[in-house]
Amino acid sequence: MTATGKELQLPFYAKASLILIGLYVLINMLYIAQDIIVPLVFAVIISIVLHPVVNFFVRKKINRIVSIVITIFLTFIIIGSIATLLISQASQFSQSWPMLVEKFTGILNQTVSAASGYTDISPEAINEYIDKGKDEMLNVGKAAIGETLITIGGIILVLLLVPVYVFIILFYHSLLIEFIHKVFGRSDQSQVSAIVSETKTVIQLYLVGLIIEAAIIAVLNSVALLALGIEYAILIGIIGALLNVIPYIGGLVAVALPMIVALATKSSGMYAVYVLIVYYIIQLIDNNYIVPIIVSSKVKINALFSIIVVFAGNALWGISGMFLSIPLLAIIKLIFDHIEPLKPWGFLLGDTMPSLLKMKPFTRKTKLS
């Protein structure tokens, strides 16, 4: 408001500049404070998922604090069991990495010898490139192990922080909800209640659905790879299920890893083809049955923004950002869908295609009217 009581109207370029500056500052803050924010975001998401379990124990006349402790303890037993299995499998895989590289290099040498007769490039030149690539692969493998150790150290730190955050968020759940209500005016209380209630319910269904989907895909992947006799089937199957949470990109990486292992460990290259076929069948089952039935949700993000936020999450917070990007975008879309001025942005993030028959063609007459 100005001194005369009139509302100050900023031109479009000024509003756009302020928005861009605000986004730049926000992104920098998120990047700088990622060591604090990432565990907190994980804790909030885990708390949303675990809240119904805590309420279940509370309804059984168990003290709320005890209910929270039991829920967190059971969650860590499940996560710890999966982590122990993955670490044991990963240890065996890292020990076999040089052997896999040697076998894969031998396959490439045979391919080069067969292909050199159809090209003008000498086998010696190609083999020189392959030897260089093999050394790089071994170095990458060693570097990856070192980075893994650093990552494990970071994960241990997160594992120490997240349970504390989860406990506090679950314990102060009613206080946090009341705070959200107090931030807004009395006239908006009904809308705030609707947004909070529906958002929490839909997110719980969405995230629990993703967890169940990942578990089913992990079992299908592992069983299929074990049936084909692929080494490290359980590790690769679980990794594929986790990558499957990342839309589009994750599926490509998930099928590439078992195909490479099949090529390196099996006598016939047809096993890689069998892996591709089996994974394609699993993807068809996932897309046509598992996702519509189990992950059926009001949260539907279109492919364009799914890919963009995955890359943006990786650039901002690394691997953690890739896994958090889709749930966070789903939360943002839910909020947009409930706030009238932001509904167009929620529509843009969704995958509901408008019917071309309902769209009015732009003509000169329309413009003049």
Image (tube, rainbow, N blue to C red):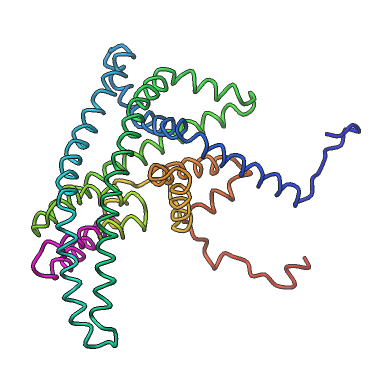
Residue 365's place in the image compared with 41, above or below, is below
Residue 299 x, y percent position in the rendering: 43, 46
Q: Viewed as shown, does residue 324 lie left or right of 335?
A: left
Based on the displayed image, in which of its 4 quarters is residue 154 positioned? top left
> Residue 253's x, y, as percent?
30, 58
Q: Is residue 232 magenta?
A: no
When the figure is inspected, residue 51 is found, relative to residue 29, above or below; the finding is above
Quadrant in the picture for the N terminus: top right
Q: Residue sitting at 14 percent across and 70 percent down?
A: 269
- Quadrant placement of the C terminus: bottom right
183 relative to 143 in the view: left or right: right
Relative to 166, residue 352 above or below:
below
Say whether residue 42 is left or right of residue 237. Answer: right
Q: Does the magenta segment cover residue 258?
A: yes
Question: Residue at 10% of width from left, 54% of height from top?
Answer: 226
Q: Main secondary structure of the magenta part?
A: helix
| Residue at left offset 27%, top offset 87% | 119
Q: Position of residue 366 (x, y in %)?
A: 72, 68
- Picture coordinates of residue 90 (x, y %)? 19, 45
The span shown in magenta is 257-286
